[in-house]
Image (cartoon, coloured by chain):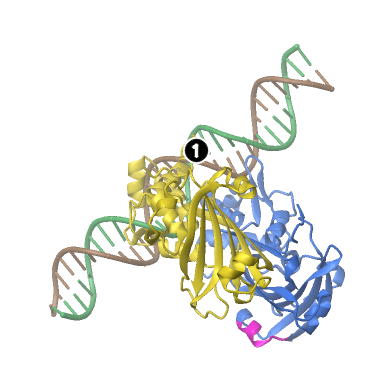
Chain colours: A blue, B yellow, C green, D brown
DNA sequence: GTTATAAAGTTATATATAGAACTGGTTGAC
DNA sequence: GTCAACCAGTTCTATATATAACTTTATAAC
């Protein structure tokens, strides 16, 4: 199990192969939070590699936010920060510290043929569409439409609602071995159509913010496309560059 | 000249000292675009360091977008991409390839006491405020208010308009030795006040997008805070995460 | 002139090694 | 019991070295 989405090997340099192998093993759940991964020395011995090569591979996963190194102690998973990083958007205005995660209600999940734009991005017609609504401060504030390729996420549409939870990327990782390593966001503004307005509890034609996101796994393959809409006046989007 | 904003040394590891030294020398204009920097070997010899240490330092500047390595050839500055990176925002909707840089009109520059919020971010009361207006497709689309600390940018307010140009970060680098390495952006929405509306050529109360940015130099010191406002319907903000 | 070939220089990958800095646990002195 | 010292294990920094992969320039062959 736990084949990563990346087709490992293909005679890549050793440090890249190790990086992908480690990412796959993390995805497979081989280690849990606050349990140390094998030390650099062990990884080197077991992989017939030098410590330098191991360190290069591990460092890449650290840079990507998957792992965390603690000097003198070991190398650990870094789930919380991982979540925070990929979820540091959509903070409500005036929401002080507000690291709280909004609740989310699944509206629908179904396998379908991808709309043309989505098919182009994901490189396949066979997708699963997820519609959900996120609440914040007891009011709906984000209506999302999410597309993931069926071949990577087969069975997702049949998962019990309970297991899906408010954050999708951890689910991708733990149940399907897909590690979302980066994403492109585009923020723009528009006005609410009938359906969106109803879901968000605002009037049709009111100003909304639109976030379109393409998410990529570690090898650069796009693994998700989503569009999210929320009332413009409650919106704040944060981004760190560089 | 060309003291970086970072206080070099302080018995940091050698690779960090070299990184900062190189950044300073780049800022000082020691090499121009498409002229190779000294090779890894030379830097090692001249700095009494090993090649591995040199490579680590250079790699950091590559990751930060300052330099570019070409296998078999050498290490080069990377101004164009640097600009593109820090300017990949504010792309107009429907602007196809649209890598074009909007023109910018300086409205005012003056030394002043910082508003409290700005002073808090920049850590000083003595700032220079720049107001400018950017045009795109012959219409104003971004009204900016920019604050930089006087101690770092002394003399900026007196520079001839000609030398300022449409992009500020290259000016920071070349004239003041300040390399903007990262930035935090916050995007939100609001409505135009009287002044903003007039500058943007829209009606007061119309929807606008607001981008607040804090920019940091390589050592993490904040070196600029700005707020930009533009008509919401013409707006599109892009960001890459991870 | 054009095209191979060679050579030198550069970055990229990989190994081996040593000691510093730090962590977490154990042992021993009191 | 408390505290200090020690120790094994870990990451971090740094060096030295060798080879591969690639680029650029010069040289030679035709």
Q: In the visual, does A17 lie left or right of B206?
A: left
Taking B32 as reference, is B120 above or below it? Answer: above
Quadrant where the N terminus of chain B sits is top left
Give coordinates of residue B95: x percent, y percent: 53, 79
Membership of A116 in magenta stretch: yes
Query: Could you tell me how many numbered marks the image carries?
Result: 1
Q: Quadrant of residue B17?
A: top left
- Residue A158 seen: no
Q: Secondary structure at mark 1?
A: loop
- Nearer to me, B5 or D5: B5
- Magenta-highlighted residues: A113-120
Membership of B26 in magenta stretch: no
**What residue lies at 52% left-to-right and 70% top-to-bottom?**
A10
**What residue lies at 70% left-to-right and 48% top-to-bottom?**
A36
Give coordinates of residue B152: x percent, y percent: 47, 45
Secondary structure character of the magenta stretch overall = helix
**What residue lies at 69% left-to-right and 79% top-to-bottom?**
A151
**What residue lies at 75% left-to-right and 54% top-to-bottom?**
A32
Taking A231 as reference, is A43 above or below it? Answer: above
- Nearer to me, B11 or A150: B11
- Residue B86 seen: yes
- Label 1 belongs to which residue? B12
Query: Label 1 lies in what chain?
Result: B
Give coordinates of residue B183: x percent, y percent: 56, 56
Q: In the visual, does B181 lie left or right of B74?
A: right
Give coordinates of residue B49: x percent, y percent: 39, 42
């Amino acid at each position: 199990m736990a084949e990563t989405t990346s087709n490992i090997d293909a005679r890549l340099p050793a440090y890249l192969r190790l990086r992908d192998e480690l990412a796959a093993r993390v995805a497979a759940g081989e280690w849990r939070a606050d349990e140390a991964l094998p030390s650099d020395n062990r990884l080197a011995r077991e992989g017939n590699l030098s410590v330098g090569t191991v360190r290069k591979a591990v460092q890449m996963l650290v840079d990507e936010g998957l792992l965390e190194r603690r000097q003198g102690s070991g190398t650990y998973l870094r789930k919380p920060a991982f979540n925070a990083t990929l979820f540091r958007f959509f903070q409500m205005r005036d929401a002080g510290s507000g690291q709280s995660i909004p609740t989310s209600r699944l509206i629908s999940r179904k396998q379908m043929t991808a709309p043309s734009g989505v098919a182009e991005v994901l490189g396949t017609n066979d997708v699963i569409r997820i519609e959900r609504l996120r609440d914040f401060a007891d009011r709906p504030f984000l209506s999302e439409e999410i597309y993931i390729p069926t071949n990577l996420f087969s069975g997702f549409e049949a998962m019990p609602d309970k297991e899906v939870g408010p954050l999708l990327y951890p689910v991708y990782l733990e149940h399907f071995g897909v590690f979302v390593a980066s994403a492109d966001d585009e923020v723009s503004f528009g006005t609410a159509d009938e359906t969106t307005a109803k879901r968000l509890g605002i009037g049709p034609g009111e100003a909304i913010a639109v976030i379109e996101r393409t998410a990529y796994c570690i090898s650069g393959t796009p693994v998700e496309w989503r569009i999210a809409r929320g009332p413009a006046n409650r919106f704040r989007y944060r981004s760190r560059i560089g």
